[in-house]
Amino acid sequence: MAISLSTTILPNTIQRSRITILLSPRVSRNLGFSLSFRPCNESIELSSSRSVITASAASGSPGIESSTVSDDTTNLLDRAQVFDLNGNGIPISDLWKDRKAVVAFARHFGCVFCRKRADLLASQKDRMDASGVALVLIGPGSIDQAKAFSEQTNFKGEVYADPSHSSYEVLGFVSGVLSTFTPQAGLKIIQLYMEGYRQDWGLSFQRDTVTRGGWQQGGIIVAGPGKSNISYIHKDKEAGDDPDMEDILNACCS
């Protein structure tokens, strides 16, 4: 059963135990937007009775929020390198070593959800600035992709690339097909398109993203000052799983 998402779809309309997801978007003249998927080479069959999400986040549960990070995690973050827009590499933990920072981890640089989240965070930058808090966005991809994202979105914070996905692996962010293609995510895509947001499909299908399947989910942390001081973590359980902005502001600016 191919899935076509529109403003009328409901989660309980998916009734078959196996579904085929087709991978290609199109705009509907009548509905404003619809989403269908078509594979490049072969169909992808998913079993709805099993989950491939590797973190402890069950479908339908809220995103994972925590303030507990192990010593092993902080040590590994010292070795996870990210790159600024000029190609300079630094350990990710240096981003909050001497300051407090809100660090958003994008799914990938073409992601429509991430562009909305970037705007939501940037809308609170004045409050962060007043509290001496830096705003940072990291994406799993190349420096060129990070530059394109920065130019397209005019994001007010700092942008870094993580080509190796090392920070995502250390922090244990969710990854999996079933965390990407959900009815809730499909409905949210429609809403975002109606608001004027667009996926950059050129960035989405570049090698840096495609080689990882595009199934990576992101999250948000509040950290610093001090490399081991991570006071808030939200891990997206699925695409478009935004945390409560007030929770972030309370963690960074209260």
Image (cartoon, rainbow, N blue to C red):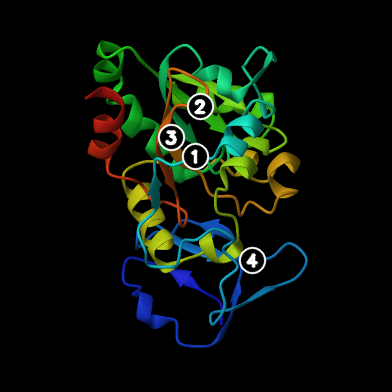
Q: Which of the marked residues, 1 or 3, is nearer the chain's N terminus?
A: 1
Marks 3 & 2, CB-CB < 8 Å contact: no
Task: Give the SS element for disc 4.
Answer: loop
Between tags 4 and 3, which lies in front?
Answer: 3
Q: Residue furthest bottom?
A: 16
| CA distance for labels 2 and 4 | 44 Å
Q: Is residue 155 visible?
A: no
Q: For mark 3, does the 10 Å Cα neighbourhood hold few (<14), some (14 to 19), or many (20 or more) residues?
A: many
Closest to the observer, 70 or 168: 70
In primary-sequence order, the first of circles 2 and 4 is 4
Residue 124: x and y in percent read: 27, 25
Kindly report which numbered mark, 2 or 4, lies closer to the viewer in this rendering.
Answer: 2
Mark 1 Cα within 10 Å, few/some/many (few <14, many 20+)?
Answer: some
Which of the labelled discs sits on residue 221, or is there none? Answer: 3
Quadrant of image for the C terminus: top left
Q: Amino acid at mark 1?
A: Val
Find residue 49 and report its horizontal and vertical position in percent: 54, 82
Disc 3, SS: strand
x 34%, y 30%: residue: 121
Q: Measured from the top left, where is residue 184 in percent x and y?
A: 38, 63
Who's the residue at 66% across and 12% down the image?
Answer: 86
Question: Which tag, 3 or 2, sits closer to the chain's start?
Answer: 3
Res 152 label: none
Report which residue position mark 1 lands on.
69
Which amino acid lies under the numbered mark 2 shown in the image of this protein?
Ser
Give how far across and how far down residue 79 sits, in percent. 69, 27
Residue 228 shows which numbered tag? Answer: 2
Q: CA distance from mark 3 to mark 2?
A: 12 Å
Give the Cα distance between marks 1 and 4.
40 Å
Residue that carries the numbered disc 4 in the rendered image:
38
